[in-house]
Amino acid sequence: MSDYKAILEEEFEVLESIFPDELEKLSDTSVSIRIEPEEQSFSDPIALSLIINYPDTYPDVIPDISLEEIDGEGELQEGEEDVVLENLRSIAEESLGMAMTFTIASAAKEALALLIVERARKEKEADDKRAREYEEAEAARTRGTPLTKELFDKWRKSFTAEIKAKRDKEEEDRVKALISKEREEYRKRKERPTGRQLFENSTALATSDEGLYEEGVQEVDMRKYTREEREAERRREEEEEERRRSGLVRDGDSDNE
């Protein structure tokens, strides 16, 4: 037992000279050493307390090693503590029979440095994955859905309905802005048949032409005239009709001309 105490006293003396600010003696058989990597991470710094409890058979067996987080100086992520402790115990096994605390503390610093490197690697992988997913999503969005006849017909129907609704709304707003008289004139214009409607009704009109002529009036084949002659004939008939209405020409006079 005396040899055991002498070994610890001697080792504690060496540790106090190496870690004057980092070492804290918790009892005659345990110490705490502040451990941090040689190069800290600015974005994710970390420092831990390395706790070592020495059994009475030390250094023929490895001490009890544990890690404690220091408030405000970073935290261990899931699984990291087990990785570090496994590494430290492996290093301690190689130093059986001799003072090993300094070796364990040095290995702990290196383990924390590797932790920082591994965290940075995982963070980069996560960033790269997010970037790939974003690029793939953007590519899919800009690539769009392959156009088919059914999709085009559906789009055209929707687009046409949208445009019509927009124009109807604009026309409704314009009509609302009109005064009462203007709205009435607008309504009358809307009720007039369009050129298309007149064209579609031309067949019916042609079959009932005989009802439009006065008795004794002969049908004129307008195809015998040029455009200028037809226009002159139309003007002559209009002038004659106007004169007849004014009493300047009696019925039948035109036949003697």
Image: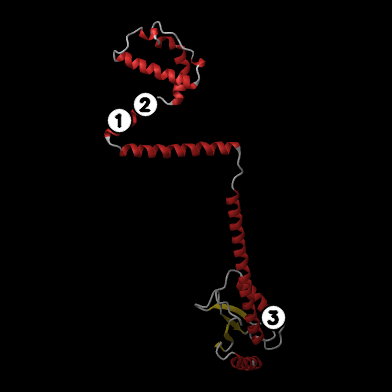
Place residue 148 in its image quadrant.
Answer: top right
Residue 33 in percent (x, y) is at 58, 85
Amino acid type for the residue under numbered disc 1: Glu
139 lies above or below 111: above
Observer-nearest of 17 and 192: 192
Which residue occupies 39% across, 16% down? 237
Q: Bin the neighbour count of mark 3 within 10 Å (Cα to Cα): few under 14, some 14-19, many 20 and up.
A: some
Label at residue 138: none
For marks 3 and 2, the one nearer the N-term is: 3
Amino acid type for the residue under numbered disc 2: Glu
Label at residue 184: 1
Amino acid type for the residue under numbered disc 3: Ile
- Does dot 3 land on a helix, a strand or a loop? helix
The colour style of the image is secondary structure
Name the residue that disc number 3 marks: 91
For marks 2 and 1, the one nearer the N-term is: 1
- Does dot 1 land on a helix, a strand or a loop? helix
Place residue 21 in its image quadrant.
Answer: bottom right
Which residue occupies 69% across, 80% down? 91
Residue 58 in percent (x, y) is at 66, 86
Residue 16 in percent (x, y) is at 59, 92
Observer-nearest of 119 and 35: 119
83 lies above or below 144: below
Place residue 193 in its image quadrant.
Answer: top left
For marks 1 and 3, the one nearer the N-term is: 3
Which residue occupies 63% across, 84% down? 105
Q: What distance separates the C-alpha of mark 2 from that of mark 1?
A: 11 Å
Q: Bin the neighbour count of mark 1 within 10 Å (Cα to Cα): few under 14, some 14-19, many 20 and up.
A: few
Name the residue that disc number 2 marks: 191
